[in-house]
Amino acid sequence: MTPIYLDCNATTPLEPEVRDILLRFLTEEFGNEGSRTHEYGVRAKQAVQKARDQVAVVVAAKRDEVIFTSGATESNNLAILGLRAAGREQGRRHVIITAIEHKAVLEPCAALEQEGFEVTRLPVTAGGFVDPAAIRAALRPDTLLVSIMQVNNETGVRQPIEAIAEILKDHAAYFHTDAAQGFGKDIETLRNPRIDLISISGHKIYAPKGIGALVMRRRGYDRPPLRPLVYGGGQERGLRPGTLPVALIVALGAAAEIAVRDHVKRRQACQKIRERALQALAPLDPKLTGDQSQVMDHVLNLAFPGLDSEALMVALKDFIAISNGSACTSSSYTPSHVLKAMGMDDDEANACVRISWRHLTPAVDWDAVANRIRTLR
């Protein structure tokens, strides 16, 4: 029996339409976007520009504000470390983040600290989101950057991005959001023009792994003053040099376009799965993680009294494939820093599992799942 995949916050399978266009550009339209002397290169360049438009539309940006990267981790590093030279030159060395950010934000910020920057790590509520008032209180004249994720990868809790954007309206700090979990799903939030930098990953929206983007919005005519982390070639406005992976880029563009086209239908399908799961699991008295009014429709983070996550995952492995935290830190057996930041002790954090699905997830026998959990008590 093959378990049903319920770990879509870690990665998603390819959307069928995306797979078809990916294969075509891998096998037929294989030209180098930088080749200007023949039709193969011209068609590749046109395809990349179309993909840039498709990504830009999702967040109401412009084509030339989209820089392709290998994924949100690289985009986060470019957004954060790319500002350090400007911070030194302007005498602005203060950065604000939350305690629940992904390691791809926490670790670049730790690197900035080693170079003399000051990083304020704000706590979150028991509901799993940062209080916008805490952002306001932490702001200083020398604040260079505020980096707050759009949606937490472990809990599915949305952060108050629009409220933070309003607080930053009259402040010079750059506003960055790691949108790996919300891009193409929570659409309107990212269209706020006060968000300067947006990191995305293709493999969270049914595109391949290894492709993502950083959206760099202008303020008037001024781009965020990023400096490259890698040099050589001059591609992507000199910020991310190297031969562009045309097939991956085109696939990301297609996935972005489909996300806008189908987001209402997808959300409705995910809501139905959520309702069915909660209905079947409710008699087991699960403890749901985070403020459920702020959780994305395709995510459940929960615990069952008296059961730890490892035992639960082993018991359910024939039915469903789930996780107990971020895939990026799955080699670490320490309690989740996200759940600890929400006020849980080690035992409570170690009891939580994350279940995340998609609009095309096959029907799950939730009653069978619930019955298996009952046998563990």
Image (cartoon, rainbow, N blue to C red):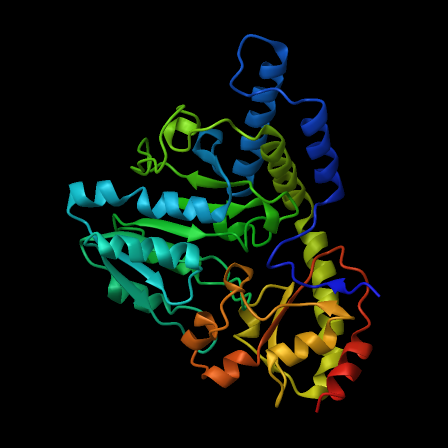
Quadrant of the image containing the N terminus:
bottom right
Q: Image check: 88 left or right of 193?
A: left
Up the image or down, 9 lies above or below 195; here it is: below
Looking at the picture, tell me which residue is in the foreground, 283 or 62: 283
Up the image or down, 103 lies above or below 76; here it is: below
* Residue at image point 47% right, 35% down: 66
Farthest-out residue, right: 1
Q: Image check: 27 left or right of 105?
A: right
Q: Horizontal and vertical percent for residue 107? A: 36, 57
Q: Quadrant of residue 324?
A: bottom right
Q: Horizontal and vertical percent for residue 212? A: 52, 42
Q: Is residue 164 visible?
A: yes
Looking at the picture, tell me which residue is in the foreground, 363 or 192: 363
Quadrant of the image containing the C terminus:
bottom right
* Residue at image point 63% right, 15% down: 40
Q: Is residue 193 visible?
A: no
Q: Image check: 131 left or right of 202?
A: left
Up the image or down, 173 lies above or below 355; here it is: above
Q: Horizontal and vertical percent for residue 319? A: 78, 70
* Residue at image point 61% right, 41% down: 256
* Residue at image point 31% right, 51% down: 169
